[in-house]
Structure formats: structure tokens, C-alpha cells
Image: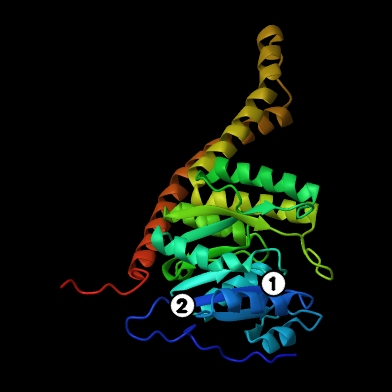
Amino acid sequence: MVREAALPLDATPRPEGAGPRIAMLLPCLNEAASIGEVVRAFQASLPAATVYVYDNDSDDDTAEIARRAGAVVRVKKMRGKGNVVRRMFADIDADIFVLSDGDMTYDASKAPQLVEQLLEEELDMLVATRKPTEKAHRAGHALGNRLFNYLARLLFGGHFTDIFSGYRVFTRRFVKSFPAVSRGFEIEAELAVHALDLRVKASEVALPYRARGAGSESKLRTFRDGFKLLFTFLLLCKEIRPFAFFTALSGLFAAVSIILAYPIVVTWLETGLVPRLPTAVLCASLMIFAFLSLASGMVLDSVSKARHEMKRLHYLALGPLLPQSEPD
């Protein structure tokens, strides 16, 4: 087992006039079958980058194999991709961060292309959307991916077509302004929503996505993780778009109250009979909840706007990607 030791803050020292510092980030859990090859592939494609492997308390030799391949290794005991990515973003300092997986499903040779596109288009995040080869996706995962991408566009807008891609490139100001809260693989959806919330410049590029190699198993569980994602989307919507969230909740309460009250009112008008007290109380309570939800949405919308302004100011305070040279 590799002991958890302090990492240097800087991915690589940058001499005056040199290019950006690049950190290659590989969160891993039980990827002994592929991590050595992945580390060597990214070292070959990004020779100027420092490759970091954060082992998420694996039961195999992932950490030791990564260390022998030349990566800087740390062990994060608390399992969950969100926990690992949050720790990586906190520990490591660089100008450009490349995030990928340790299972050889992504093409490491395309990393320079991603970095170059990020710089040329002055983006803050570039997502490598997945073009699956044969049998790279399970049928249930492919369908769920399409549904959740549609839901994300419906709730938060934007243009993302693959919010769950694990292959991304970020600027420092994006990484250091990202208030990660997710514990699991929901972190990828949270990254997309953060970009949409701050309205930073982000884009996508389609790259091949391969099936896992022998000895590597997916950590996803279709139904369990699907419900987690749905809950995460609702939570993010409540935090970022509280007025829309609570207005929808208010409309739901009001609609149910009206539906339940309709036959009561009709009966009273036709017969003059007073409805039973419990039914009337239920209808009145639901309508009260509707008004309370609407009021909560209005108040929390102001709070959300203040939080958005604070995040935006922090993002701006981090400065440009590279120090700006003085004009001649």
C-alpha cells in the first residue's frame, strides 16, 4: 500500500516564458489491469504534464502499479469518484487540468488535441463526448445517458450532449471555483451544471470510446445510480433555479388541491351538504403548501442570485489562464 504523502502544489515548475503547467488527473478504483498502460499512454502524449493517480482505496495493486509506471500517487480512503475529484482539485495546482479514467476506455493520444483546442478557443471546459465502438456501452446505460442528457438540457439549458463523459480539460479558474459537493460519479453532471451556472465558455468534441479491457469492471449500477442521478438533478435545480423548482412544486400542490376540492364543491352546490371535515382540511392544507412553496421560491431566488454573484466574483478573481504580458 502506498502511504498518503503530501503532494507538491505545482504540477510542474514553469520557467519564465514557458507554456502552461498541465496536470493529468486519473481517479481510480481497482484498475490494476489497465492503470499502468494508461499512465504510460498519457505520459507519451503529454510529456510536459505531471500524471497524478488518486487510488480510491482499491482492493488490488492499482496504486503500486501506477507508482511504478511513473505517476504521482495518493490514496483517498473515502470511496466515490466525487470525493476523489474534489480532493484532486483541492490538492493540485496547475494552469490546465486534464481529467480521465484509468480503464483505457478513452484515447490518451487525443489529449494534446484537447489541450490545444481549449487554448485556441479560450474555453474554460472542453468535454470529450463519447463515440462508442461496438459493445462499449451496455444498452441500459446508453438509454439512461440519453434520457439524463435530455433532462439536463430541460432543467439547466445549455448544449451538452454527454454530461457523463469522464474525459475533460479545464482551466485553473474553473477548477478552483468549482464547489464540488457530489460523492459519487454524479460529479460529472455537477461539472456541467457549474459551467452553465457561471455561463463560462465550454464546448464539446467527439472522440472514440472503447470497451473496457479484460479484468476491468464498470462500477456503475443501472437502477441504483440512476435514482442517485435523478436526486442530484433535483437538488441542483433547487439550489440553482429555486424559483422554477418551487413554482413547479406550488403548481403541483395547487392542482391536487383543486382536483380533490372539485367534487366537494359540486356536491355542496347541488345538495347543500357540508363536506366531511378531514377532506376539506386536506384541500385547504394543500393550497396553503402551494402558496408557501411559491413564497419560498421567490425568497430563495434572491439568495441564489447572491450566491451566483459570489461564485462569479471568485472565478474572476482567479485571473486569466496565463499571466498577461505587458504591451510594448
Badge 1 crowding class, 10 Å Cα cut-off, few under 14, some 14 to 19, many 20 or more, is many
Residue 308's spot in the image, x, y percent? 41, 56
The residue lying toward the viewer, choosing from 311 and 93, is 93
Residue beneath the point at 67% across and 23% down = 259
The residue lying toward the viewer, choosing from 3 and 263, is 3
Residue 75's spot in the image, x, y percent? 68, 83
Q: Cα distance, mark 1 to mark 2?
A: 20 Å
Q: Amino acid at mark 2?
A: Ala
Question: Relative to residue 313, is residue 186 drawn left or right?
Answer: right
Residue holding disc 1: 102
Residue 306's spot in the image, x, y percent? 39, 56
Q: Earlier in the sequence, mark 1 or mark 2?
A: 2
Residue holding disc 2: 94
Q: Amino acid at mark 1?
A: Gly
User: To which quarter of the image does residue 108 belong?
Assistant: bottom right
Residue beneath the point at 60% across and 71% down = 85
Residue beneath the point at 68% across and 85% down = 69
Which color mode does the image show? rainbow
Q: Is residue 309 visible?
A: yes
Residue beneath the point at 68% across and 64% down = 184
Question: Relative to residue 208, is residue 125 drawn left or right?
Answer: left
Residue 223's spot in the image, x, y percent? 79, 51
